Image (cartoon, rainbow, N blue to C red):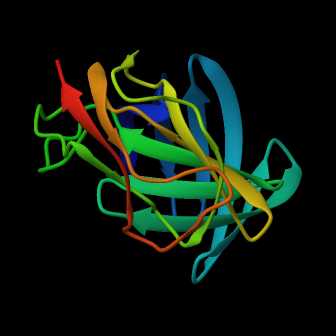
Amino acid sequence: MSIRKTILVDGLPHLVEAHGRDAALAARVDDAPLALALVRDGAAWRVTVDGRTIAATVVRDRDAVWVALGGVVHRCVAGDDTRSGGAASGVRSPRVTAPMPGKVLAVRVEVGQRVAAGDPLVVLEAMKMETIVSAEGAASVKEVSVVAGAAIESGQVLLVLEFT
């Protein structure tokens, strides 16, 4: 296997290159070399990076992959993803939805505010892990549908954007 792809992690681009077979990979992330070993058991993963093993939970949700490491959840999207809904495809949903059930910790925007790609919009908590929902592109906030402290369901509309 060999890949070279730009991955947006919480809205920030990282060039990822990986080569290897089975669970052992030689990788470079933003030109930093890494030796990786991956073991998967359902949504749970054991990732060994340069000899240090950590547990991770990985969940795919449409065009995003959510990765929980050490109590922090990261949203990862392929930067050159051309599938419908992909960040770089030009086809973006104006409706920002909850990736999982949980609670709204903070709403970081208000109606009329302009945001850029990667700007934090809403902070969610699920299973004692924080998730930052970020803007996929430059936009104006048209509607905010939740408030801090609200319980939310997976797929619930959090806010509506108008892309510029």
Question: What residue appears at the point 57 percent right and 83 percent down from the top-left corner?
Answer: 42
Residue found farthest to the bottom = 42
Question: What residue appears at the point 75 percent right and 59 percent down from the top-left corner?
Answer: 129
- Percent x, y for residue 83? 14, 49
Residue found farthest to the right = 52
Tell me: residue 30, above or below residue 35. Answer: above
Answer with left or right where residue 44 lies relative to residue 137: right
- Percent x, y for residue 73? 66, 52
Q: Quadrant of the C terminus?
A: top left
Of 155 and 46, nearer the camera is 155
* Tag count: 0
Question: What residue appears at the point 29 percent right and 19 percent down from the top-left corner?
Answer: 138
Q: For residue 39, what is the image quadrant? A: bottom right
Of 54 and 93, nearer the camera is 93
Tell me: residue 102, above or below residue 149. Answer: below
Of 160 and 49, nearer the camera is 160
- Percent x, y for residue 100? 51, 69
- Percent x, y for residue 148? 64, 50
Tell me: residue 43, above or below residue 5. Answer: below
Answer with left or right where residue 107 lies relative to residue 37: left
Of 108 and 26, nearer the camera is 108
Answer with left or right where residue 118 lies relative to residue 140: right
Question: What residue appears at the point 48 percent right and 74 percent down from the top-left corner?
Answer: 153
Tell me: residue 21, above or below residue 72. Answer: below
Answer with left or right where residue 136 lies relative to residue 122: left
